[in-house]
Image (cartoon, coloured by chain):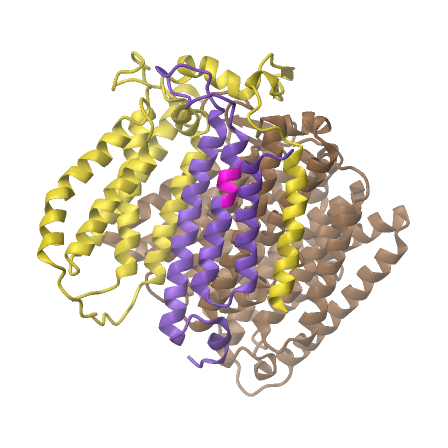
Chain colours: A brown, B yellow, C purple
């Protein structure tokens, strides 16, 4: 039997161990990180198989909740944790490309970023969620500035400021909930949420929603996203799009469904989602810098997920979760490919990248990733968008569906423009090295696999109806 | 323009939150708190969560300081996360302040009063810090304040001797060993009793130094860790000096 | 009537938010973040207060205040300190690269 707490304890153990190993050999620390993330991904996979029947509660310290902290893992949490750790493992191979010192500290920060994101998904305690949010964001702040150039520092500063405002809001929300209910366990809160004063309840919900919205890249607290993604080292941009962002949006889902038990259509959430989609996609269309374009596209995609959560029908939430998985894989792939293109073109402008992706080891995965993000069948991204659309359609929200489709068309337009440029006949083709193409190919295989054979994912997503009625 | 916007937003937020907090009674008796509900056993208790801690805390954890009981035992997992946050901060500051070309900065000597005074005080401050974290389960204080006090003694050395350098390797090693102790204590609990961070040592007699099971062990580890991490942060921010 | 403990702490939070939005000097912004943090911590602590009660330590006669907010604030303070340390070191980094901490000037400075 796999205990969920091991997913947090092992990375911590390895992170605390790595300075000691670093005194002896820096190279071994890098391999240790790859080993640790691989171990975590395996454990998460085994955990996923285990929680299929019923949710697992891992009591910490031997005190029954709400006295002590409990980890609460249902099938949905387990699959998000699995995807996070799997992508983290794949990106940790690409980490071998980072040369800048101090590499031991970089590895530790990366491992703790993975640990924090996993913890946010697994925990069943509101304050513990806040602690893991802070672990994730503090690791992100330092990684965002790791390049130590002006771009990186300014992006990180923006992130610190907005992130601190966000965590203040989370803490205000926790204070309001605690002062009324005198508990911090999510299921305990859910059971007694009805006894809260309605006004206090709404303010608490809004505070938590805005606070976790920072990590989930929600409008208007997402202005840090392009600067941070642009300024961070390439593996870290890939990791940001797939680890903390997914953990943040899962925390939002926990707040909406598990704690506050909203089951019907949420105007507030849908409007925030729509604003996020348009903010992201329209600005992405105007971008000339590749990493900034991908960052704005990431905002757009996160907005679609938030919309799916807000529409709140089983189908739409299934779509949101499918989109989370597809986006984690697809954006990680695109950012790794972007790292290679920037290296090959020695410039971050898209127009300088003519023909840079003509090497099949980069080109084919890049094409698969871009098509998946655009939502083309038979790739992974198709089902997510399709389910969100159908979820809205079956409930008759035609105006929202039309806006959603319009945003998708904008997305297709700028990705098509990007693909056309990188596959045009250029002058020179550079061969990628193993640390670049192995992660690309692994991610591409996963995207195709999930797209062509979606059965296992759909089996997991059947539990969505239990999740939105307040289950784990 | 920006100021007006900021002021409007600030006043708006103030009104919204003041209205919410106006509904929360201040200094209410604990008997008025709502009873807690155990979602796993699916039963409602007959008392509120803080009341449970205050009534059964001594039997559950062996500590006499209930805040410590909550911090290290009931909610020990939060504390593990908190320690990780501080570890991250020290690692992050170290990585951001890292410079490849070690250009040394000239510094001036401080005066004789500060030098002699800090020599005298250094040992006592460390002793006091150690006292605070060793007695964390009995009296106010604990690993975090104790560690901060220890770091302040090093800060005094930095003030008195601007060329002073704490050895990074030793700081890193003590940081890691203390962190590893915490995680290993947690994993031992998992192996022995089936719960991560389970308090598996005998509680002993309350109010004695050797009581409360693993709480003093964890607090000593936290004290050492916080002390070396804060010292590391100060050292990294001071930069390379001559 | 809303107690002035709450009003004071909320004012601190709001003052912090105002500083963060309106000021253009990085160090002032970081101070604003710290004020905001302090406000929330005070708020959380005052929520756990019980009239005429003391610290929850054995040997001190009761009644006791709620121990949980104190434990939570301990965590929140440490987190706040960590964020502050990082924010300051990022500000040092920006100063090293651009030679200024004013946001208006930073944008114009070439590396």
Image: C59 above or below C71: above
Chain part drawn in magenta? C39-43
Q: Quadrant of the N terminus of chain B?
A: bottom right
Q: In this view, does B203 lie above or below A338?
A: above
Q: Quadrant of residue A459?
A: top right
- Compared across the picture, whether B135 is left or right of B199 comes to left
Q: Find out whether residue B221 is within the magenta segment.
A: no
Asked whether C40 falls inside the magenta stretch, the response is yes
Question: Picture coordinates of residue B49 (x, y %)?
Answer: 54, 21
Q: Residue at x 15, y 66 (%)?
A: B108
Residue drawn 46% across the image and 13% down it: B56
Q: Residue at x 27, y 52 (%)?
A: B232
Give coordinates of residue A114: x percent, y percent. Answer: 48, 48
Work out which quarter of the rendered image holds the C terminus of chain B and state it.
Answer: bottom left
**Magenta region, mostly helix, strand or loop?**
helix
Q: Can residue A430 be seen in this view?
A: no
Residue B206 in view (yes/no): yes
In the foreground, B198 or A328? B198
Q: Nearer the viewer, residue A247 or A272?
A: A272
Tell me where residue B18 sits by quadrant: top right
Outermost residue, bottom side: A427
| Residue A127 screen position, x and y as percent | 53, 36
């Amino acid at each position: 039997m796999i205990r969920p707490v091991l997913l947090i304890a092992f990375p911590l153990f390895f992170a605390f161990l790595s300075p000691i190993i670093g005194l002896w050999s820096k190279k071994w620390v890098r391999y240790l990180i790859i080993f640790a993330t691989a171990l975590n991904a395996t454990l998460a996979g085994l955990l996923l198989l285990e929680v299929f029947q019923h949710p697992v509660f891992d009591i910490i310290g031997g005190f029954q909740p709400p006295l002590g902290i409990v980890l609460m893992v249902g099938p949905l949490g387990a699959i998000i944790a699995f995807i996070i750790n799997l992508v983290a493992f794949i990106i940790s191979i690409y980490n071998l490309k980072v040369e800048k010192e101090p590499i031991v500290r970089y590895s530790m920060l990366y491992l703790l970023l993975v640990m924090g994101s996993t913890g946010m998904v697994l925990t069943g305690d509101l304050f513990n969620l806040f602690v893991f949010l802070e672990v994730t964001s503090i690791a992100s702040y330092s990684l965002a500035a790791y390049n130590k150039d002006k771009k990186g520092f300014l992006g990180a500063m923006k992130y610190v400021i907005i992130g601190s405002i966000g965590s203040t809001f989370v803490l205000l929300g926790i204070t309001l909930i605690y002062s009324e209910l005198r508990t911090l366990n999510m299921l305990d809160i859910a059971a007694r949420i009805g006894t809260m004063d309605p006004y206090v309840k709404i303010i608490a919900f809004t505070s938590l929603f805005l606070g976790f919205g920072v990590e989930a890249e929600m409008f208007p607290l997402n202005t840090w996203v392009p600067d941070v993604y642009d300024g961070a080292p390439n593996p870290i941009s890939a990791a940001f799009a797939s680890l903390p962002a997914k953990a943040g949006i899962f925390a939002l889902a926990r707040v909406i469904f598990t704690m506050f038990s909203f089951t019907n259509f949420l105007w507030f959430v849908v409007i925030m989602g729509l604003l996020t989609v348009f903010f992201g996609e329209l600005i992405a269309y105007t971008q000339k810098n590749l990493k900034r374009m991908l960052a704005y596209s990431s905002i757009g995609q996160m907005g679609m997920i938030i919309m799916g959560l807000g529409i709140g029908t089983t189908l739409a939430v299934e779509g949101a979760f499918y989109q989370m998985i597809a986006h984690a894989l697809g954006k990680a792939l695109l950012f790794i490919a972007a790292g290679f293109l920037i290296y090959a073109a020695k410039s971050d402008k898209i127009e300088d990248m003519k023909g840079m992706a003509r090497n099949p080891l980069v080109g084919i995965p890049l094409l698969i990733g871009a098509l998946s993000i655009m939502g083309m069948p038979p790739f992974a991204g198709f089902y997510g968008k399709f389910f969100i659309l159908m979820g809205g359609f079956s409930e008759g929200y035609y105006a929202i569906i039309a806006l959603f489709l319009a945003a998708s068309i904008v997305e297709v337009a700028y990705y098509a423009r990007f693909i056309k440029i990188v596959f045009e006949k250029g002058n020179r083709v550079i061969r990628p090295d193993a640390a670049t193409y192995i992660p690309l190919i692994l991610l591409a295989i996963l995207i195709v696999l999930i797209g062509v054979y979606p059965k296992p994912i759909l089996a997991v997503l059947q539990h969505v109806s239990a999740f939105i009625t307040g289950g784990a | 323009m920006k100021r007006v916007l900021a002021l409007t937003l600030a006043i708006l937020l103030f009104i919204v939150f003041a209205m919410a907090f106006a509904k929360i009674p201040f200094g209410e008796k604990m008997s008025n708190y709502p009873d807690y509900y155990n979602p796993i056993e699916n039963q409602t208790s007959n008392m509120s969560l803080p009341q449970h801690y205050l009534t059964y805390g001594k039997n559950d954890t062996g500590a006499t300081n209930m805040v410590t009981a909550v911090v290290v035992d009931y909610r020990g997992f939060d504390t593990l996360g908190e320690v990780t946050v501080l570890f991250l901060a020290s690692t992050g500051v170290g990585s951001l302040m890292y410079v490849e070309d070690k250009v040394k900065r000239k510094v001036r000597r401080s005066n004789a009063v500060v030098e002699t005074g800090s020599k005298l005080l250094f040992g006592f401050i460390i002793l006091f810090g150690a006292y605070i974290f060793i007695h964390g389960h009995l009296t106010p204080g604990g690993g975090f304040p104790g560690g901060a006090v220890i770091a302040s003694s090093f800060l005094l050395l930095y003030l008195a001797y601007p060329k002073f350098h704490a050895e990074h390797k030793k700081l890193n090693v003590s940081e890691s060993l203390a962190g590893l102790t915490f995680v290993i204590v947690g994993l031992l609990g998992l192996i022995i009793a089936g719960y991560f961070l389970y308090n598996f040592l005998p509680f002993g007699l309350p109010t004695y130094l050797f009581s409360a099971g693993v709480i003093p062990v964890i607090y000593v580890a936290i004290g050492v860790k916080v002390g070396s991490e804060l010292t590391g942060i100060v050292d990294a921010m001071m930069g390379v000096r001559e | 009537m809303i107690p002035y403990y709450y009003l004071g702490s909320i004012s601190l939070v709001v003052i912090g938010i105002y500083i963060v939005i309106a000021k253009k000097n990085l160090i002032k912004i970081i101070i604003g973040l710290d004020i905001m943090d302090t406000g929330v911590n005070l708020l959380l602590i005052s929520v756990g207060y019980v009239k005429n009660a003391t610290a929850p330590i054995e040997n001190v006669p009761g009644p006791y205040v709620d121990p949980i907010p104190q434990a939570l604030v301990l965590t929140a303070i440490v987190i706040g300190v960590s964020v502050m340390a990082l924010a300051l070191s990022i500000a040092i980094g920006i100063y090293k690269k651009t030679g200024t901490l004013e946001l208006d000037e930073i944008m114009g400075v070439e590396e």
